[in-house]
Amino acid sequence: MEQLNVTSLNTLAMINMETGLIVLLIVLVLFGGSKIPQLMRGVGKGISEFQEGIKEGKNSIRAGLDESKSE
């Protein structure tokens, strides 16, 4: 397997940055400046709910493991 050198990592980072800028530009064109805060608010709520679900899942798994250890 080939090892990545610093130059190739820098190239990958530039490609990702360029891609991100293009996506932001497309979002701005599609939704306009006034809809972006609403869109980001919805994304933030979605991320929060996802993280809460992960915590609940971890707690459920831990409770199950603790229950099985006590038996």
Image (cartoon, rainbow, N blue to C red):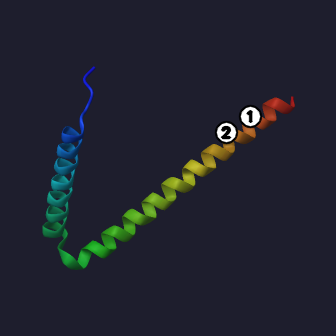
Measuring from the top left, give residue 50's x and y in whole percent. Answer: 49, 54
SS of the residue under disc 1: helix
SS of the residue under disc 2: helix
Where is 16 relative to 9, above or below?
A: below
Residue bearing the label numbered 1: 65
For mark 1, does the 10 Å Cα neighbourhood hold few (<14), some (14 to 19), or many (20 or more) residues? few
Which residue is at 19% across, 63% downward?
24
Q: Gap in Å between the C-alphas at discs 2 and 1?
A: 6 Å
Measuring from the top left, give residue 16's x and y in whole percent. Answer: 21, 49
Which residue is at 82% across, 30% downward?
69
Going by the numbered disc 2, the residue's amino acid type is Ile
Q: Residue furthest right?
A: 71
Going by the numbered disc 1, the residue's amino acid type is Leu
Where is 56 relative to 8, above or below?
A: below
Left or right of 11: which side holds 3? right
Give me the disc on residue 40.
none
Where is 59 relative to 48, above or below?
A: above
Write down the quadrant of residue 32 in the picture. Answer: bottom left
Q: Residue furthest bottom?
A: 34
Measuring from the top left, give residue 44's x and y in whole percent. Answer: 42, 65
Write down the quadrant of residue 3 in the picture. Answer: top left
Residue bearing the label numbered 2: 61
